[in-house]
Image: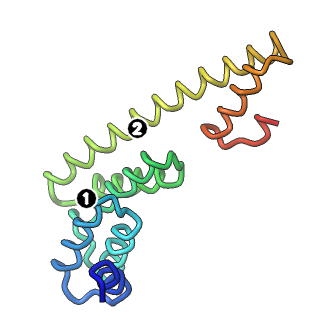
């Protein structure tokens, strides 16, 4: 059995050894196999290993998926995980790190929102000034991926 297939089969097994499972999740996270890492970390939390390090790693994985895919759902899940660590963790070390990561995520989200707003305004401006211009329609289409709002583009 190949190494990749063996690791995938380990994901589906119930958690027996926290350290081994967590180490695998961290390894997958570092290799950008984020969904597999998230699956293992969620499984660990489900089985009672809801330690600050597990939650922080899960939040970081959500954050990285949100960054790579620009998916709002993962941003919300990352913010929620960071919030849980900040509000409920006894470890000052992990709370401090979670606050730092949460602030950087919030800053990144606000920058995206500002850029999105500027692109939206520019597209509206081009639409009113030259409605038959290919550039204005291109701008509107380009905003679709950012906004994920079909009504805006239509």
Taking 49 as reference, is 130 above or below it? above
Please indicate whether residue 69 sits to the left or right of residue 3 in the image: right
Residue 78 rendering spot, x and y as whole percentages: 40, 53
Q: Nearer the viewer, mark 1 or mark 2?
A: 1
Residue at 82% x, 36% y: name it.
Answer: 154
Q: Earlier in the sequence, mark 1 or mark 2?
A: 1
Crowd class of label 1 (few under 14; some 14 to 19; many from 20; radius 10 Å):
few
Taking 129 as reference, is 118 above or below it? below
Residue hosting label 1: 30
Number of disc labels: 2
Q: In this orientation, which residue lies closer to the viewer: 62 or 1?
A: 1
Residue 112 rendering spot, x and y as whole percentages: 49, 32
Q: Secondary structure at mark 1?
A: helix
Please indicate whether residue 103 sits to the left or right of residue 76 in the image: left
Crowd class of label 2 (few under 14; some 14 to 19; many from 20; radius 10 Å):
few
Q: CA distance from mark 1 to mark 2?
A: 23 Å
Residue 34 sits in which quadrant?
A: bottom left
Q: The N terminus is located in which quarter?
A: bottom left
Check contact, mark 1 vs mark 2: CB within 8 A. Answer: no
Residue at 50% x, 45% y: name it.
Answer: 70
Q: Secondary structure at mark 2?
A: helix
Residue 42 rendering spot, x and y as whole percentages: 37, 73
Residue 61 sits in which quadrant?
A: bottom left
- The structure's colour scheme is rainbow
Residue at 53% x, 50% y: name it.
Answer: 71
Direction front: furthest residue: 2
Direction right: furthest residue: 132
Please indicate whether residue 47 sits to the left or right of residue 108 in the image: left
Residue hosting label 2: 106
Residue 72 rendering spot, x and y as whole percentages: 53, 48
């Amino acid at each position: 059995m190949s190494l990749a297939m063996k690791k995938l089969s380990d994901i589906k097994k119930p958690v027996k050894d926290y350290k081994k499972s967590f180490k695998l999740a961290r390894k997958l996270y570092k290799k950008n196999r984020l969904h597999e890492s998230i699956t293992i970390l969620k499984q660990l939390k489900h089985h009672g290993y809801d330690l600050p390090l597990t939650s922080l790693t899960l939040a970081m994985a959500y954050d990285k998926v949100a960054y790579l895919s620009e998916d709002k759902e993962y941003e919300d899940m990352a913010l929620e995980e960071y919030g849980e660590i900040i509000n409920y963790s006894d470890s000052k070390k992990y709370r401090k790190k979670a606050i730092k990561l949460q602030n950087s995520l919030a800053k990144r989200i606000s920058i995206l929102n500002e850029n999105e707003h500027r692109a939206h305004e520019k597209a509206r401006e081009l639409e009113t000034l030259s409605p038959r211009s290919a550039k204005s329609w291109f701008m509107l289409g380009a905003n679709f991926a950012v906004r994920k709002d079909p009504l805006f583009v239509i």
